[in-house]
Image (cartoon, grey):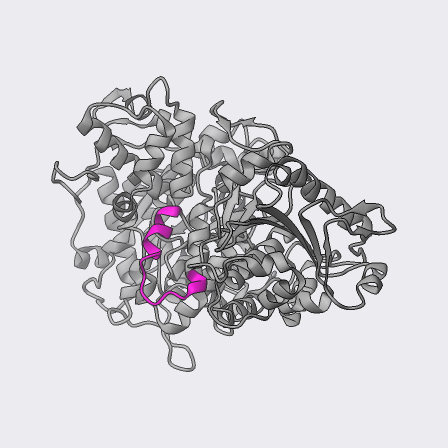
Amino acid sequence: MMTNLGERWATDNTFKPGFVDREEDVYRVTEELYELQESRKQLSGRSNSSYYRLTIPFSPHMFGSGKTTFCVNYLELIRRFSETSLASFSSNSSKKEFLDKLKTSTLLYVDLRDLEPTEPKEKSLEWALYYLLYRSACSQVGLSFMRPQDVYKQIPLYPEFLLPELRKILGISSEQFLLVAFDEVGALDESYGEFNLERTQDGEVFPYNDFFGIIRQLCKEDNIFFIVVGKSTGLRIKNSVAFGPRVLLHFISLSPLSSSNIVEFLEKSTLKGQVQHRICDILCSSSFSVDELAEALLECTGGVPGLVTRAVNMLLNFVQTRGQPFMLKEECLSCMNEDSFQRICAEPFIQPISTSDEDKKSEFGILLMMALFHIPFKVYDALNSGYYLFDAVNEMGLYRYPIKQDTFQVLIPKVFVGNFEYLPSLSLFEKILLGSLKLQPFDCFFSSKCRVFEGIVAIRLILMLSSKVRNEFRELLCQLSAVFKEMKLPIREPLPLDYMRSVGVSESKSESNKKRKTYESNEWNKIIQEALYFDKVYIPIDTTSHSPDIIFKLQSPVDSKVLIVGVACKGRWNSERFGWSDIIEEGEKFLVPVSNQVLSNAPDKNHCMLIVVSTKLAFDVSRELGDQSRCYSSGMSIESESFTIPSNCELVILCERDVEMLIDKEILNGLERAFSSDRPLFGDFGPDLLRRIRHSFLSWQ
């Protein structure tokens, strides 16, 4: 912790964080606890059914996801939500009775970091866990506890003896529910040599198998429930397979906070010992609202609770030291974008990729692509034969963003990106991905087949424009267009993919009623002069019918000619093909307005090109092209003269063979399988396809 008041970014903890609702997680955990209650007969052998497996709500998240806060406050939350979001849960009498009893239950919090070999059976994990439960119960109610030897004589190693003793200490009857929350489950990572643990047939030891086996025995008793949380490098999804039919772990998603959640957090948090002083009132001024502060924190931290709390602490110390709140959102963002702020904010959470082994480092680019393009993955999606994506995200210290049950996206907060950029031995491809993640707004876009295809094409274009070696695709464009051949290539360095606000959308108001800059379809002069920098590749963020999918501009080194390039990416993954009417529509929405508004002002200097990249051209278009890419220059007509290329413009249509020059055929086939219309979104978009894409990118460096 930084205590030097001279430091710009002190991390002294000066406020009491407010607790924010987690309705979805509360609902799901309540369902799982009810499932345990209903199936306890099968678990204890009082039923002939052999299908039931013990269900335990479990959250193996890394630092800062709010695990401890959630489990400690779970009972408070179900009381809060019992009349709102949990009302639908208690729709029948059995569930209503269960929920009513759960609201009056007692929580026993157990920190597994206190687990240690315990006399007189030092090598018994079961005895150590029993004694820790006893000691935790005594501590929770303020009682002194007996020595291990005395407890061992009094409480035999059977659940039917331990649980009544715990209830007696906590002052609850046998009919009341007892909810035990085990925290810091990762402590078991260090227990391999401390206890006699069960070994598999090949001699391997998994402490978690023994741990959950003990819990399973305890769950045979009535009215006892468990939640297990904690960060762990040893507990992987694959371990749960070893639990066999005995235990089924249900993952608590613990979603990052939304903008409205952060507003609630800021409004509920107060200075320590000064409940009348809300944090939002100290940080914000009349010209800088709490909504804007929440948006800035979301952009910086991705909504990860631990990062939000630490960032607020740092901002609070900064504001109190200088004696003045933030006046504008831009001022606050400027502070959070400082390298020193991001380094210090991420310090307790980040796990350097540089310490990972070579196999894990090779997968870093795959996870970066998944984060940038918002590609979802399932809990049991395998990265390779013995390694799951879920585990890879954990072990690299990244975060998971749940989008539905057992389905996640990779989340890399921007404060992490700033630290990752300084890692040694990053490939050029990984540097582009990291830079692109840093520029991409947090609310950029949702999962979309089109966005993945556009992103792959855009990064290919970055590598094509910057490659210092012979590049067939760049040579093709130079052959097709004399103007393109005049441009200064390769560009000095590969810059990251940038995301710009939409073209053709009026200025819209955000939650904080502040205008967010976008461009009208008649503002192309402003777009090209103000928004587009030379040698950078842009993707307009929001879906719009008034701009191409990718935009960039190049400059000639001799006579200062400017070439504005738009790319229409049309991934057609079903029977629908891209025909002349589609091509004309693309030309009319880009070439025509740019020619009228921009090129006419400096006809000798400015030029515009539209490149059509389609994975499946209509048959009549392919016949016209003759299986060759073609460039239509200004004055030329297409489709029976229904569209004439405007002055100083060019329209390039890539034949399917040359599209494969831009994206390998194997990758295109993989995209088609993943994006088939009769499959779920990203149905077959797995690590193997991403690995091929990564390898293809690396070959262009």
Which residue shows up at 43% across the image and 26% down it?
291
Above or below — where is 324 with respect to 633?
A: above
Which residue shows up at 57% across the image and 36% down it?
525
Instruction: Residue lying at the far right in this picture: please name it.
Output: 640
Residue 413, percent from left and from top: 40, 47
Q: Is residue 23 magenta?
A: no
Above or below — where is 373 with respect to 98?
A: below
Q: Quadrant of residue 456?
A: bottom right
Question: Is residue 464 visible to the viewer in this orientation of the structure?
Answer: yes
Residue 532, percent from left and from top: 51, 43
Q: Is residue 420 magenta?
A: yes
Which residue shows up at 39% across the image and 47% down it?
414
Taking depth in this image into account, of 234 and 15 the one nearest to the observer is 15
Instruction: Residue lying at the far bottom in this picture: please name it.
Output: 202
Q: Which quadrant is the N terminus positioned in?
A: top left
Which residue shows up at 58% across the image and 33% down it?
519
Q: Quadrant of residue 138?
A: top left
Residue 142, percent from left and from top: 20, 38
Compared across the picture, whether 679 is left or right of 372 comes to right
Residue 236, percent from left and from top: 43, 64
Taking depth in this image into account, of 61 and 314 the one nearest to the observer is 314
The count of marks equals 0
Above or below — where is 156 with respect to 283?
A: below
Instruction: Read off the magenta span.
Output: 414-430
